[in-house]
Image: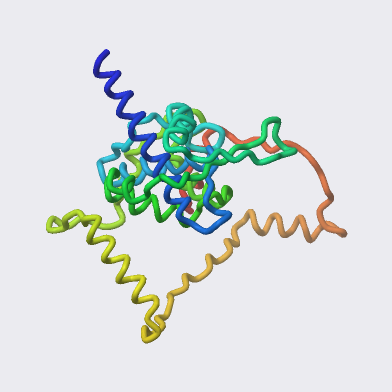
Amino acid sequence: MSNQVAETGLITERVDLLIQFCLAVAGDGDPGEQALGPIHLVKYVYLADLIHAERHQGQTYTGAPWRFHHYGPWSPEVWKRIEPAVTAVGALAITIPSTKHENDPIIYQAGPDLSLNELDRMLPSEIAVHLATLIRKYRSFTPELLHYVYGTKPMLKAAPEELLDFSFALAAERPVREEEAPISKAKLRRLQKAITAARGNKAVTKQRVRVEPATPPRYDDDFHQVARIIEDQECGLEACSGVVAFSDEVWKSKAREGAE
């Protein structure tokens, strides 16, 4: 029982830290883009676990269980920590009047005393750096954030209501060299400053960007069959309505992974 209590306490501590870190990063942005809703906070905590799992043999940072629920990753353990975590750091709760929802949505904005630097030092460097980059890119842009999250490996390997397996998230893009060592936060900051300085240097020459060619259309038997049907219609296809049913096997199909 004591081990279970300790594990629960660790999950709570780490989830709270990530939620507060997300608010601090968002609060460092432009006016009008400094607040995050509960759905954004949940997805960013999931991405933090994903970042950690990619570099630690599939082990997540928080240890919270994640499930494929309502089209995306979901964890009740993370959801129930949002209000306590934001309250603990004096975050501002902003109510958004809405005619689409029974209850008006609430978003949260970092208070003046929330220190990004302090929270940054409390997180593993790989999470702090990569998660901050994602937050600054997607912020509270819900469609873009959800599109990115839904395309992550644990989601593409799961079916609705299944627990997500983060072992699929292991980074396999390139082999890791034995001589490589983890980059310190101080070195990462120096690299970021150097990149920023280089971008601001007018003497830097423009480099050509390689553009990937468009995927050619697939002229298979199905294409030609549909083309003949369209050609046979004097005025094109008539409007119709109905229900399209998909087999449950579609969730584990190669199509969800972007394969041919």
How has the structure been colored for display? rainbow
In this picture, residue 81 sits left or right of residue 140: left
Q: Please, is residue 205 above or below residue 176 in the view?
A: below
Q: Nearer the viewer, residue 40 or 52?
A: 40
Q: Residue furthest left?
A: 179
Q: Residue furthest top?
A: 1
In this picture, residue 203 sits left or right of residue 228: left
Image location (x, y in percent) of residue 105? 63, 37
Q: Residue furthest right?
A: 235
Image location (x, y in percent) of residue 74? 48, 33
Please report the residue visible at 70 percent of the width from the left and 30 percent of the height from the top.
102
Please report the residue visible at 65 percent of the width from the left and 57 percent of the height from the top.
223
Q: Nearer the viewer, residue 180 or 31?
A: 31
Image location (x, y in percent) of residue 77? 43, 27
Q: Quadrant of residue 220?
A: bottom right
Q: Is residue 220 visible?
A: yes
